Image: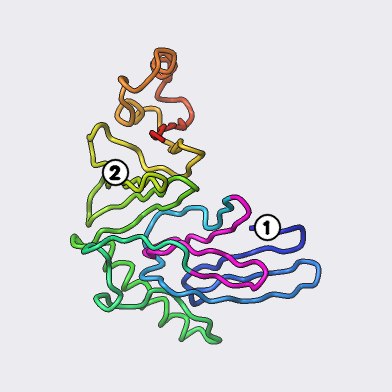
Amino acid sequence: MPLSVDNYLFSFPYLWTDQEVAFMNISTGNTTYVKYQGMISGGNGLEHQHFHKLGDSFYFIPQGVNYYFYKIDTLEKKVSPAIFLDFGINEIKEGELPGRASGKRVDNDKDRMDIADEYSVRHNFLRKSDKYVIPMQKFFNEHYVYIYMVKGQESYGRHYIYNRMRDVGYLIKRGEPFCMYPCFAIDGNVLLAVCQPSELPMCVDRKFMAPEEIATMEGIKDEDNSIIIKYHLKR
């Protein structure tokens, strides 16, 4: 992620490094590696954008089971927890899990394979378990926090939307009021999702749509390209 004209921030595959990001100046070539804490399992969850800019501030949201959003200090080159996602009794404790949460920098192939095996043990344990609620997708802006989570082997998860201004949250389950599709970003008060044309009727509710939107939807064919859905949130 670009921080300025010459300064960039990079993340790494969790398997081959410990929990860290790198500040790099492309003019001087200087690189500063910074560690953070909080990863429970780097191998579980949907791929998403790791770095975000809100106003003049930069944030880092790791992929996987991690309940923190981190704020980036570009001057001091630090990464520190800014928001904690409180899952209550559903919070996954690292001490309960086999294997390891992330990798480690090592110099030989045997150690790399041992680390990869331990990493896979934890990933597969959580993936196959019916007990744990996995935060698959998470992001936020100035007004909202969005989390998509799945428990066990569910084919469809739950959406939690927290209004930061009003200090109130909503949990959306399957079919309540409709089968909301997992979202990938937020723009103002609009959540964005992508689905296939054949899935569209299940992912929207006509009573929340304008007549012209319904007409557009009815003209979409199954062989058309993927569809971007906009879910408008109440302010």
Q: Is residue 198 magenta?
A: no
Disc number placed over residue 170 in the picture, else none: 2
- Amino acid on which the number 1 mark rests in the picture: Pro
- Amino acid on which the number 2 mark rests in the picture: Tyr
Residue 62 appears in the picture as rendered: no
The mark tally for this picture is: 2
Q: Is residue 20 above or below residue 171?
A: below
At x 36% / y 28%, what residue is drawn? Answer: 200
Picture coordinates of residue 181, whole percent (x, y):
35, 38
What residue would you read off at disc 1?
Answer: 2
| Nearer to the camera, 23 or 83 | 83
At x 49% / y 64%, what residue is drawn? Answer: 70
Q: Residue furthest left?
A: 130
At x 35% / y 45%, what residue is drawn? Answer: 161
> Alpha-carbon distance for marks 1 and 2?
34 Å
Secondary structure type for disc 1: loop
Mark 1 touches mark 2? (CB < 8 Å):
no
Q: Quadrant of the N terminus?
A: bottom right
Q: Is residue 8 above or below residue 93?
A: above
Neighbor class of circle 1 (other Cα within 10 Å; few <14, some 14-19, many 20+) is few
Q: Is residue 155 above or below residue 180?
A: below
Q: Residue furthest right?
A: 27
Q: Quadrant of the C terminus?
A: top left
Secondary structure type for disc 2: strand
Task: Tell me the magenta residue range.
Answer: 55-80
Disc number placed over residue 131 in the picture, else none: none
Picture coordinates of residue 214, whole percent (x, y):
39, 16
Q: Is residue 61 left or right of residue 118?
A: right
Q: Is residue 58 magenta?
A: yes
Picture coordinates of residue 18, whole percent (x, y):
49, 77
Q: Earlier in the sequence, mark 1 or mark 2?
A: 1
